Image (cartoon, rainbow, N blue to C red):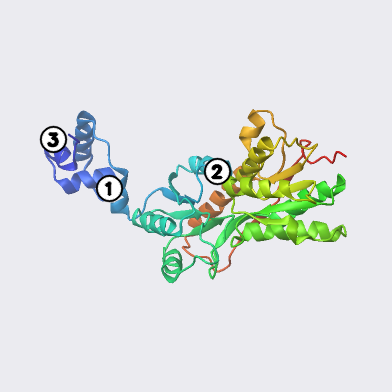
């Protein structure tokens, strides 16, 4: 049976209120009485509840982190960066995974508010078409600082840390063009998300800058899942005038492309070149050299956590001036971008 404050009070011969003052280091307690309480705590092997302490202090030493895909290495590395900074400041994390479900995200936000956390780091799963009055009211009335990580909340302004998706996509497609490719397809993410729109914009920008016509039949609309990318890649490989290269807008979709290539005996880059957005660690492990745009995910997590800490230290729950930071991605070439006639 768990030891309670009442057990300590009885053992020390003091009131429950006195034990509470000792535990929370609040209010006056005689040294002799304090020693009795501490002795009872030690003898009974009592561990104070962090939740109970937070209720008395009206806040916790905890930060909420909300992500849409915990199984995606992209978010795993962001969380790693967040956790590194949190450890340095003795902060705890509560992690919520929404599975890209707006209702789950709404539930997570309400839960975190009930836990009296100090602030929230979030990559919103909500898309331009998903927002509703309950969601907007909830996130705008949390009463605690919110920092966005590479995601946006339509109709609202929050501090945030983002990747320059246009530059990343532009660099990838420019590299393919420099290698000699002119027939370049793109598999986009969900077009109701800003990163997907910006990556498509970067793709088009690179083609325009190099006087290559934008062919609508080479633009394929995905949804960030490997299943959808697999089906799209099958379609691409059946095209009469098929492209010689594909720019894939997410790491998970790259896996779908690879599966389709394997089934159709397509060799990279001999039969088809490919560059993805974000790395796929498993491909490195098995020695498959796929070029990719490397988003600074760990740095993004660190930067977002530091931004939140700065806000907390300022004592403001909301910012009069919204601060956003855009981090530059890097192109990592491994040979899959080559043009082989």
- In the foreground, 319 or 304: 304
Q: CA distance from mark 2 to mark 3?
A: 51 Å
- Element at badge 3? helix
Q: Answer yes or no: is residue 25 visible.
A: no
Q: Which residue is mark 3?
A: 11
Q: Which residue is mark 2?
A: 72
The structure residue drawn at horizontal position 41% and vertical position 48%, both measured from the top left corner, is: 62
Q: Residues within 10 Å of mark 1 (few under 14, many from 20)?
A: few
C-alpha distance separating marks 2 and 1: 34 Å
Side of 21 relative to 87 (left or right): left
Label 2: how many Cα within 10 Å (few below 14, some 14–19, many 20+): few
Quarter the C terminus occupies = top right
Name which of mark 2 and mark 3 comes first in the sequence: 3
Query: Can you tell which mark lies on residue 52?
Result: 1
Q: From the viewer's perspective, is 79 left or right of 104?
A: right
Q: Position of residue 117 (x, y in %)?
A: 40, 53
SS for callout 2: loop
């Amino acid at each position: 049976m768990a030891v309670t404050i009442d057990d300590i009070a009885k053992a020390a011969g003091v009131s429950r209120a006195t034990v509470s003052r000792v535990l929370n280091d609040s209010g006056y307690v005689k040294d002799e009485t304090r020693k009795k309480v501490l002795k009872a705590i030690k003898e009974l092997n009592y561990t104070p509840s962090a939740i109970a302490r937070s209720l008395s202090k009206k806040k916790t030493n905890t930060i909420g982190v909300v992500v849409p895909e915990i199984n995606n290495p992209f978010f795993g590395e962001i969380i790693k960066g967040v956790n590194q900074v949190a450890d340095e400041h003795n902060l705890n994390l509560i992690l919520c995974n929404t599975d890209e479900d707006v209702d789950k995200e709404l539930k997570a936000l309400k839960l975190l508010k009930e836990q009296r956390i100090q602030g929230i780091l979030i990559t919103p799963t909500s898309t331009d078409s998903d927002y509703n009055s309950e969601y907007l009211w909830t996130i705008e009335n949390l009463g605690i600082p919110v920092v966005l990580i590479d995601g946006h909340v339509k109709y609202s302004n929050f501090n945030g840390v983002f990747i320059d998706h246009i530059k990343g996509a532009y660099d990838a497609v420019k590299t393919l063009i420099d290698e000699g490719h002119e027939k370049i397809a793109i598999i986009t993410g969900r077009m109701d998300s800003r990163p997907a729109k910006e990556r498509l914009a970067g793709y088009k920008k690179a083609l325009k800058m190099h006087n290559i016509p934008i062919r609508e039949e080479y633009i394929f609309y995905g949804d960030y899942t490997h299943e959808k990318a697999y089906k799209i890649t099958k379609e691409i490989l059946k095209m009469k005038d098929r492209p010689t290269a594909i720019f894939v807008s997410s790491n998970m979709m790259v896996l779908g492309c690879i599966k389709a290539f394997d089934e159709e005996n397509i060799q990279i880059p001999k039969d088809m070149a490919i560059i993805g957005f974000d790395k796929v660690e498993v491909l490195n492990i098995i020695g498959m050299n796929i070029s990719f745009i490397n988003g600074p995910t760990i740095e993004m997590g660190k930067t977002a956590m530091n931004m939140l800490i700065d806000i907390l230290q300022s004592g403001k729950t909301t910012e009069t001036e919204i601060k956003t930071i855009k981090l530059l991605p890097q192109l990592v070439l491994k040979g899959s971008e080559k043009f082989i006639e």
